[in-house]
């Protein structure tokens, strides 16, 4: 028995080693760096205690970035969990499986396209004489046409919209798979009892796929807090910092301004926020289970 | 038996994993001196030029291996910073001159090249247009080899100017008068893509130079001053005066779209570097250029040319300084410098390399303009601290977008300067 257990630990060893080297060691190192003033050019490192963290609270761009991340999370939850759930439920209602498969494929395809390609594509759509403004003019809404990525009021929402378009198919597919696993008998029993479609969705579908919904929530929270590529490709945080998020702010501080210590403090804040939201989600889930 | 099998499998897993964990990434020693050259030329004719010169150098010097690597223009600064942070500095690396190059020198990352340049009665040094060394010289020592010189001017569509009977403006008032005529004719007067805020930053390079006293400007860029001179606000107000003449919604327009509007004939004027002339050349109309107009009565330098040289520096930690110098001498010999001009349309800093064999008449005239400039005014984004530049350029972008006033821009800059100085 003991031999079996020793063998199991040995099998786990490579994975644990990889985790330690590539995950926990950098996190610990990053934590140490966040207490340093590290000059990249000179290679000097000076211990400055919590100064990097205190500076965060005086940095206006940090709060702009934080708010943008929160917007990202909330809108992603609305669309990639809420709307994706509705899409999944509707698609799985189709009698003809080939129609359901068609819609699943159409909605999933954007997930497969490279983000750089999508960024370029939407830069053309969003530009002043682009597709979106032409469409708005066509339907009589020309007065709201603008350069969507160059307007501080719309840049972050324009990028978030692209993100929803790209990723909604992914969570929808996860939810579709979960719905397909629900035994048909349960729906048949509900139909015999005269339960309406809406109540079947609310009282049968949603509770039985709650695990997958929870996974989708976690994916979207972490995705919203860690978002980098979309912003970097489409606006690079502009115009005038209005679409900055924590990851782009961290990147610029580390690799443009050479402030590695300050960037490390931002990285720790991102980590703490992720842990906080994950713990909150687990807490809500457990309370739900207990009730 | 089971135990042995388990141990064998785990051992195999470890054997597979360990090299991945601890591999240093370096190639095996081949007996050659391996020199890594890291540049911002990741595509196009300039990359091809480097590839070909490195290949011919290695053919002539079989004991030296040149490894070329590059990052694109937008990412170069970040990538070289990462290389420095990980203590894996390339042997030879690209650098913009001025404050940007000084960072490497102050950090002890750059090799002093003075003695190499001055050897043999300064033969190598004198093969260059020597004023191009100015912005690579710190404390009377030279740390960079200027590879390509540059300048910035307003390119203009001569056909449109002829059609509307316009003359090249020589001062600010004439410039505004020309722009008014162009605006009334339906052309975009000045093409601008400012989605990346450095484009208006480059305007401010010149406007600050024209409006702010030279001594004040030099002291403030070196962070010895605090950017409180009222002329900074005046300079920004001049930029605000140009806003109605720029491409509509220019804060949403990309740099490429800015060029395209000019070469497609939609826009009449475009502010651009001489080194980007290869993108102007496809234009199917007659074009020329004029210097940024003088601002009469302003306290700044009206004659300095905006645009400093770009070059190569040698790492202070290179194992093979002699091999690095050998390669740099080869790269900047007369033949290869002519090749740089002819094939990449870059303005070589080597004296005489721009001639009737390597360049057309326009390039030769541009080269003369750069060569004869009394003073060189480095790009704004390389002239001062990167954090100050980031704040300055972002605030300028906000101002030209109507979200800030000139006074608010300078208040942002002054606050950032104070913060940066406090952290020094």
Image (spheres, coloured by chain):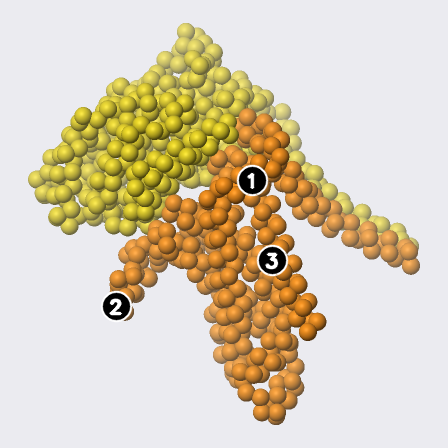
Chain colours: A orange, B yellow
Q: Is residue B284 shown left or right of residue A173?
A: left
Image: B409 above or below A286:
above
Q: Chain of mark 3?
A: A
User: On the image, numbered disc 3 is attached to which residue?
Assistant: A277
User: On the image, numbered disc 2 is attached to which residue?
Assistant: A140
Q: Chain of mark 2?
A: A
Label 3 residue SS: helix
Label 2 residue SS: loop
Q: Residue at x 51, y 74 (%)?
A: A86
Q: Which label is found at residue A233? A: none
User: On the image, numbered disc 1 is attached to which residue?
Assistant: A54
User: In the image, residue B24 lies at what x, y percent?
Assistant: 66, 35
User: In the image, residue A118 lies at what x, y percent?
Assistant: 43, 56
Q: Residue at x 21, y 44 (%)?
A: B245
Q: Alpha-carbon distance for marks 1 and 2?
A: 50 Å
Q: Is residue A64 shown left or right of residue B283?
A: right
Asked whether residue A231 is in view, the answer is yes
Q: Nearer the viewer, residue B105 or B299?
A: B299
Mark 1 and mark 2 residues within 8 Å of each other at the beta carbon: no
Q: Is residue B68 shown left or right of residue A288?
A: left
Q: Residue at x 38, y 24 (%)?
A: B225
* Eye-nearest disc, 3 or 2: 3
Q: Earlier in the sequence, mark 3 or mark 2?
A: 2
Q: Alpha-carbon distance for marks 1 and 3?
A: 22 Å
Q: Residue at x 18, y 40 (%)?
A: B157
User: On the image, which quarter does residue B339 sit in?
Assistant: top left
Q: Earlier in the sequence, mark 1 or mark 2?
A: 1
Image: B137 above or below B257:
above
Q: Alpha-carbon distance for marks 3 and 2?
A: 42 Å
């Amino acid at each position: 028995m003991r031999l079996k257990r020793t063998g199991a630990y040995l099998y786990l060893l490579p994975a644990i080693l990889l985790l330690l080297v590539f995950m926990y060691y950098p996190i610990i190192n990053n934590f140490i760096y966040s207490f340093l003033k590290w000059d990249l050019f000179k290679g000097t490192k000076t211990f400055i205690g919590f100064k990097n963290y205190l500076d965060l609270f005086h940095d206006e761009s940090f709060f702009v970035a934080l708010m943008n991340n929160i917007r990202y999370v909330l809108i992603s939850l609305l669309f990639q969990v809420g709307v994706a759930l509705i899409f999944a439920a509707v698609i799985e209602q189709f009698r003809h499986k080939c129609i359901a498969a068609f819609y699943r494929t159409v909605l999933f395809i954007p997930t497969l396209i490279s983000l750089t390609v999508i960024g370029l594509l939407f830069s053309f759509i969003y530009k002043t004489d682009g597709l979106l403004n032409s469409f708005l003019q066509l339907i009589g809404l020309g007065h709201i046409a603008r350069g969507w990525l160059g307007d501080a009021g719309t840049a972050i929402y324009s990028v978030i919209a692209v993100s929803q378009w790209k990723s909604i198919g992914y969570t929808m597919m996860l939810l579709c798979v979960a719905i397909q696993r629900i035994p048909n008998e349960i729906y048949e029993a509900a139909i015999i009892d005269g339960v309406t479609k809406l109540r079947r969705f609310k009282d049968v579908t949603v509770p039985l796929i709650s695990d997958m919904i929870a996974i989708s929530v976690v994916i979207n929270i972490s995705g919203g807090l860690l978002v980098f590529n979309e912003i970097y490709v489409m606006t690079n945080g502009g115009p005038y910092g209005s679409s900055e998020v924590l990851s782009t702010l961290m990147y610029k501080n580390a690799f443009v301004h050479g402030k590695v210590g300050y960037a490390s403090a931002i990285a720790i804040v991102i980590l703490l926020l992720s842990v906080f939201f994950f713990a909150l989600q687990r807490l809500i889930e457990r309370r739900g289970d207990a009730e | 038996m089971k135990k042995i099998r388990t141990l064998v499998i785990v051992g195999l897993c470890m054997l597979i994993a360990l090299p991945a964990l601890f591999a240093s990434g370096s190639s095996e020693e081949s007996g050659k001196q391996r020199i890594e050259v890291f540049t911002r030329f990741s595509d196009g004719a300039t990359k091809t030029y480097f590839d070909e010169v490195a290949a011919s150098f290695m053919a002539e010097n079989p004991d030296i291996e040149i490894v070329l690597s590059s990052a694109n223009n937008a990412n170069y600064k970040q990538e070289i910073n990462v290389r420095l942070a990980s203590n894996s500095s390339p042997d030879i690396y690209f650098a913009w001159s001025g404050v940007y190059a000084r960072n490497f020198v102050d950090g002890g990352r750059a090799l002093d090249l003075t003695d190499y340049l001055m050897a043999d009665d300064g033969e190598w040094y004198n093969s260059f247009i020597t004023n191009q060394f100015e912005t690579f010289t710190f404390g009377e020592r030279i740390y960079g080899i200027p590879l390509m010189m540059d300048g910035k001017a307003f390119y203009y569509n001569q056909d449109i100017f002829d059609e509307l009977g316009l003359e090249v403006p020589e001062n600010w008032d004439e410039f505004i008068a020309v722009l008014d005529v162009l605006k009334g004719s339906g052309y975009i007067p000045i093409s601008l893509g400012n989605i990346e805020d450095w484009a208006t930053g480059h305007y401010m390079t010149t406007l600050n130079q024209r409006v702010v006293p030279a001594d004040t400007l030099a002291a403030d860029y070196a962070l010895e001053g605090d950017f409180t001179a009222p002329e900074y606000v005046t300079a920004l107000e001049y930029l605000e005066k140009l806003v109605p003449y720029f491409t509509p919604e220019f804060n949403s327009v990309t740099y490429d779209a800015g060029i395209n509007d000019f070469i497609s004939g939609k826009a009449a004027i475009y502010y651009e570097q001489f080194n980007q002339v290869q993108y102007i050349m496809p234009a199917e109309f007659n074009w020329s250029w004029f210097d940024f107009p003088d601002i009469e009565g302003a306290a700044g330098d009206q004659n300095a040319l905006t645009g400093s040289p770009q070059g190569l520096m040698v790492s202070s930690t290179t194992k093979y300084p002699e091999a690095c110098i050998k390669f740099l001498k080869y790269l900047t010999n007369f033949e290869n410098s002519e090749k740089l001009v002819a094939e990449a349309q870059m303005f070589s800093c080597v004296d005489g390399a721009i001639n009737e064999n390597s360049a057309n008449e326009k390039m030769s005239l541009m080269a003369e303009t750069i060569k004869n400039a009394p003073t060189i005014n480095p790009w704004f984004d390389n002239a001062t601290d990167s954090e100050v530049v980031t704040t300055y350029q972002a605030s300028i972008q906000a101002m030209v977008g109507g979200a800030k006033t000139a006074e608010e821009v300078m208040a942002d800059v002054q606050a950032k300067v104070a913060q940066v100085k406090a952290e020094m």
